[in-house]
Image: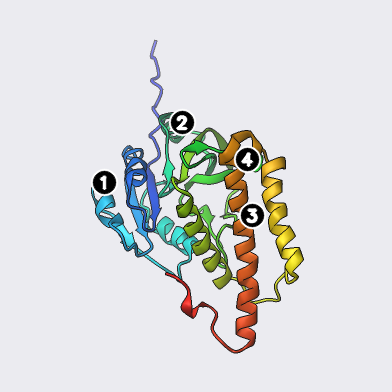
Amino acid sequence: MIQCKEQKVARATVTAVVFTYNSAGPTLKRVLEAIQWADEIIVVDMESKDNTAQVCLEYTEKFLTHNENENINANFNFGYQQATSDYILHIESDYVVPPELKREILDVLSNDQRSDIYEIGITNYYFGKPVRLSVWEKIRLPRLFKKGTVSYPTYRIETWPKLLSQNKRSLKNRIDHYTVEHIWELVRKYNRYSDIEVRNSPNEIPLVHNPLLLGFSALGCTLYNYLFRGGFRYGMHGFIVSCLLGYYYFLQRAKRWERYCTEQQGKLWDQNLQP
């Protein structure tokens, strides 16, 4: 009797594409060490002023610089295009892939019924502690996908990617997102993000142009995150994160108003922005 041997399915290859900007530090090293199993590692950097390049070059030779009007979404698309593997693993400079997620990724890439897109949940760490607001717990983002199936619109940041395939699944394990260690880092990040957000948005009449409405809207954002999204469950960490989310909401709307008023006077709003 002739026995047929099962053919082993070849594992699909994967490129980890890492996006950085002034990211040098212990977290970046942890990020890069956690993806050394990938077939290819590409770093796409937005012209960092610190020693991000030196740190990254210890782990990969493929360090690229790309900065299109400080638009991180344009960098995402650029990085995806550089990958040479079957699949792309989207990694930001504060994303750490835990061992259990690594094993799950390698398992699905070895499956003969692979999906085009795998959505992965994120556990956010603020000041060294996980803060799991309810809305974040439900979000799954396409972070492992076949090349050519995901792209980002470049008109704004903090937006959803465009999926070019609906053949998708969710992974069980999550990425650990070490956002910031210190409050000043988050304030700086929100200031920069709000600048980019407003710069890349159309200059329209601000949605919030009444002082009381703006103030109460920002306060409402804070209370909503603290009371209804579960920030109160994390003590002072949850309270501070909720307040800073309200601050970010305020910055975005206030800068839209500032830009509108400035350009109504025929002046350029973004010529004196902080780098």
Q: Is residue 169 visible?
A: no
Q: In the image, what residue type sits under mark 3?
A: Gly
Q: Are marks 1 and 4 in contact (CB under 8 Å)?
A: no
- Judged left or right of residue 39, residue 92 is right
First along the sequence among labels 3 and 1: 1
Query: Which of 55 and 41 lies nearest the eye of the viewer?
Result: 55
Label 3: element kind? helix
Q: Considering the image in quadrants, where does the N terminus appear?
A: top left
Q: Which mark is residue 27?
A: none
Colouring used for the render: rainbow
Q: Which residue is mark 3?
A: 246
Q: On residue 133, which mark appears?
A: 4
Quadrant of the image occupied by residue 139: top right
Label ID, residue 104: 2
Q: Amino acid at mark 1?
A: Tyr
- Neighbour tally class for label 1: few under 14, some 14-19, many 20 plus, Cα within 10 Å: some
- Tell me the SS state at disc 4: loop
Q: Are marks 2 and 4 in contact (CB under 8 Å)?
A: no
